[in-house]
Image (cartoon, rainbow, N blue to C red):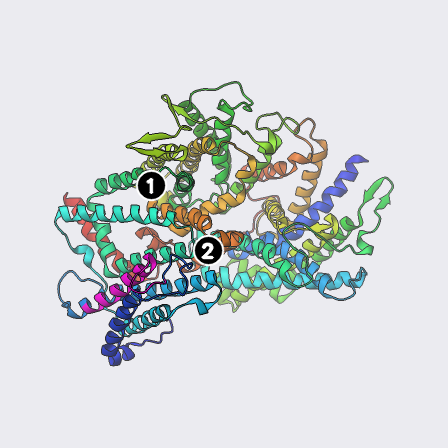
Amino acid sequence: MDVLQQLINGLSLGALYALIAVGYTVVYGIVQLINFAHGEIFMMGAFGSLATWLIVPGSSRSLAMLVIMLVGGVAVAVGMALLTERFAYRPLRNAPRLAPLITAIGVSIFLQEFVRLFFGSIPSFPDAKSAIPFPQIEFVTGPAIDLGGVIIQRAALFTLVALAVCATFLFIFVNRTRLGRAMQATSQDPDTARLMGINVDKIIMVAFALGAALAAVAGLSWGLRYTNIDFRMGFLAGLKAFTAAVLGGIGNINGAVLGGLVLGVVETLATSFIPGTFGGSAWKDVWAFVLLILVLVFRPQGLLGARVVDRA
Amino acid sequence: MRRPTIFTPELQQRHGKTGWLLGVGGGVLLALSALLPWSYSFEALDGPSLLFYPSPLQVMGLVLGLLVAVALVLGRRAGRRGRVQVGWTAGARAAAVGALVFVVIVLVSIAAELGGLVNVDYGGWVALVGALLALVGTRLQPAGRSATLYRAAARSWLELVAIVVVMAAALFGIAYALDTDDPGTFVSFVVFVGALVAVLVGLGVLGWLSAVSQRHRKVLILSAFLVAYLFPFTQDGSDANMSIATQVIVFAATALGLNIVVGLAGLLDLGYIAFLGAGAFVAAILSRSAFSTLDFHPPFIVVVLISGLVSATLGLIIGSPTLRVSGDYLAIVTLAFGEIFRITMINLDGEAGPNLTRGSNGIPAIPELNLFGFDFGEPHVLLGIPLGRFSNYYFLLLVVIALIILVFSRLNSSRIGRGWVAIREDEKAAEAMGVNVFGLKLFAFAGGAFLAGVAGSVKAHIDVSVTPDQYNFLQSAFLLAAIVLGGMGTVLGVLVGAALLILLPEKLRFVSEFRLLLFGLTLVVMMRFRPEGLIASRRRQLEFHEDDEGLAERIDDQIQPSAMKGATA
C-alpha cells in the first residue's frame, strides 16, 4: 500500500509541475526562449488569486469563491505574461540568443522583488516579505479522503482534476481550433507560417497567455495544497517544471504533461525509497536535478521527443 | 527606425547662431553659479551654501559649464578641413546633457536631505537655468562630423604623460568617491565622472586615449597596477574602505572568470557561484580551522591548486553532458547545479549525509593566511603608512586578479579565443570550419570553473567563515549583472561593472531595499538598449547591432589604422 500511496502523492505533485511545464514548452516551441520568468508568472498567479480573495468582500470560503479566485489569478498571470512579452522579449526577437535569456533572468528577479516590496503596500493586503497564509476553500481542502488505506488530500485531488481538465481543453485547443493549428504551424516553421497569413506576433502572445493561464491554475492549487505562498515559490517550482518539460521533450505539450507527472513520481519515490543517508526530503531536489542531467546525457530529446525546429 | 526629434536639421539651420549664443551663455552661467550659494544650509551635501566659496560639487558644476562653453567656442573657430577632427559639438552636447543631469541630481539631493525644494538657494536655480540653456543651445547646433582624433599621433612622451594623468585622475577619483559617505554627494560625483567620460568620448579624446593605450599597452597595464597598489596608501590606515576594495576585487575576479564563459564563449552559466563556493569550501576544509572536518592541512599554495581542480572537475562533470546539447539547456542545468551545490553543502552536516561542511553553519574561524612568514592578519607599517588586514589581502588579490586578467587576455587573442568567438557567433559554421566545438566549450567551462575555485580559496580566508547560503543563485545573478552592465567580453568593462555593483549599494544605503529590484531592471534595460554593456568590445558591439551600417564603418575606420601599425611594427 505504501508504494501506491507514494504514487498518488507523486502524481499530485507531478500534476503541479505539469501545469507549469506546459508554459515553458509552448513558449520554447515557438520562440526558442527559456522563459525563466515563467516560475514568477506562476507565483503571480498564486498572489493574484490571493489578492482576488482579499478584494472580493465577504471573504467567503465557498466553491463559487474558488472560481472567482481562479479567474482573478489567471487574469493577473496572463496580464503579467503579456506585459513581459511585449516590453521585454519582443524587442529582442532578432537579437543574439544570450540577450533574451539574460532579460528573462532580469524579469524573473524584478517580478520577485516587485511582489516582495509592493504587495503589502496595497491597503489591507498582508506584507509579502514572508510567507502568507492562503485562504482555504472548504470543498477542496476539507478532510482527506480515505480510499481503502490510500489517503488522498482533497487539494491533491483538486490539482489532478485541474490538470485533467486543463489538458483536455489544451488538447482540443491545439488540435481542433484554428488558433491552435496556427500555433502548431508557427512552431514548425515561423517563416512559412507567416507566408500562410498567420499573425506570428499574435500566436506568440497566445502562447505566453496560454502558459500563464495554466501556471495560474497551478499557483492556486499550490496555495490550497501547501496552505501558504511566498514570493520565492516560483524559483524552485519553475526550475522543476522546466526539468519536467525537458524530460517530456521540449516543445512537446503532451510531453510536458507526462514529464511533469514522471518527475513528481520520481521525486516522491526517491524521497521515500532511497535507503541510507541520501534518502529523505533533504535530498529530494537534488534527485530531481540529477534526473534532468541524466535525461540530457541519455535522451536529450526527452521521453516523447522534442518538437523544436533547430534554428541556430 | 527613426527617432522623433524636436531639433530638426531645419531648425538647427535657422537658429544655429542663437543656439551657439544660448549654449555659451548657459555654460558660463552654470560656471558662474558655482560661486553662488546652491543651498541655504551648510548641512546639505558637501556644503554648497557659501558665496564665492565653491564646494567640491560646485567646482564640478563649474568644470562642466566651462566645458560646454569652451567646446562651443573652440568648435566655432576650428577649421572644417584636415585629417584629424575634434568632435567639439558632440563634446559640448555631452557636457550639456551631463551638466543638466548633474545639476538636477544635486538639487534633488539637497531637497531630499533637507526636506523640500525650498532649501535650494538662488544659485542652484541659476545653475539649473544655465544647464537648461546649455542643453537647448547645444542641441540647436548642427551635429558636427564625428571625431577622428584617434588618428592623431602625438610625441610618445606626451602619450605617456597622458596615460599617467589618466591613472592619477583615476586614483584620485576612486579615493574621493570612497571618502564620501553622503549618498547625494556620491551619486553626484558618479554622474560627474560619467559626464566627463561622455565629454571625452564626444570630443574624441577617449578614442585617442584608446589608440594611445594600444600603442603603449605595457606602460598602461603597469601603471594601472601601480595605481592599484598605491591605493591603500591613500587610506591613512583606515581599513573600512579597504574592506570594500577587497570585496570589489574578489567580485571582479570572479566576474572575469565568468566573463570567459559568458562573454567569450557565449555559454550562459547561471551556477557559476557554485564553483566559487566549491573553492571556498575546499579551502575552508583544508585550512587549520578548529572546525575543519578533514585532518589534512597542506600549505596554501597547494590548497589553491586543489580548490581550482575540484571546481574544474565539477565543471567537467556538469559540462560534459550538457555542452553536447543545445546551449539553452546549459543555462538551466547550471542553474540547477547551483541549487544542487547549495543543498548538498547544507546536507553534508553529519545527519542527512556525511559530515564534511557542518551543514548550514558552515566552517567558521578560518585562520589568517600566512605566506612565507608573512601574516595577513597583522597590520603592517610600510613607508610610515599603516596598512590593515584588508590592505594585506588587497595586495594578494591584486596578484590573483592580475593572473586572471593575464589568462583572460592571452586566451582572448589566441587561437582558442578565436574559436570561442566563432562558436558564440555561429556554432554550425564554426564546426564546419574545423573548430573543435565541444572541446573548446568544455575548456571554457572548466577553465572558468578553475579560476572561480582559485578566487574562492582566497575568499574563504578573507571572509573568515564559509556558509552555504553565501553562494545562492542571486550571487550568480549579480555576477552576470556585473558583466552585462560593464560589457561582455572586456576586462575593463567587468572591472567597472563590478565596482559599480559593489560600491553603489555600499554607498547608497537607502536603496539597499530596492537593490535587487534595480538589478533585475538593469538587466532588462541594458539588454534592450545597450546589450554590449557600458564599455563595449568593438566586435561585440557589432554583433549586437548587425544592421547598423554607420557603426560598422566607424569601427572599421578605427580598427584599420592600428591594425596596419601592428602589421608594420
- Of residues B312 and A312, which is closer to you in this image? B312
Residue A164, x across and y down, in percent = 73, 54
Specify start and end residues of the magenta stretch as a single range: B49-73
Please tell me whether residue B66 belongs to the stretch shown in magenta: yes
- Which chain letter matches label 1? B
User: Which residue does the numbered mark 1 point to in the structure image?
Assistant: B417
Q: In the drawing, does residue B163 fall left or right of residue B545?
A: left
Q: Quadrant of residue B61?
A: bottom left
- Which secondary structure class fits the magenta region best? helix
Q: Is residue B511 left or right of residue B399?
A: right
Give the spatial CA distance, label 2 vs label 1. Answer: 28 Å
Q: Which residue occupies the foreground of this view, A258 or B107?
A: B107
Compared to residue B174, the image places residue B202 above or below, namely below
Q: Residue furthest bottom?
A: B14
Subunit of mark 2? B
Residue B522's disc is 2
Q: Is residue B339 above or below residue A114?
A: above
**Residue type indicated by callout 2:** Thr
Q: Position of residue B464 (x, y in %)?
A: 49, 31
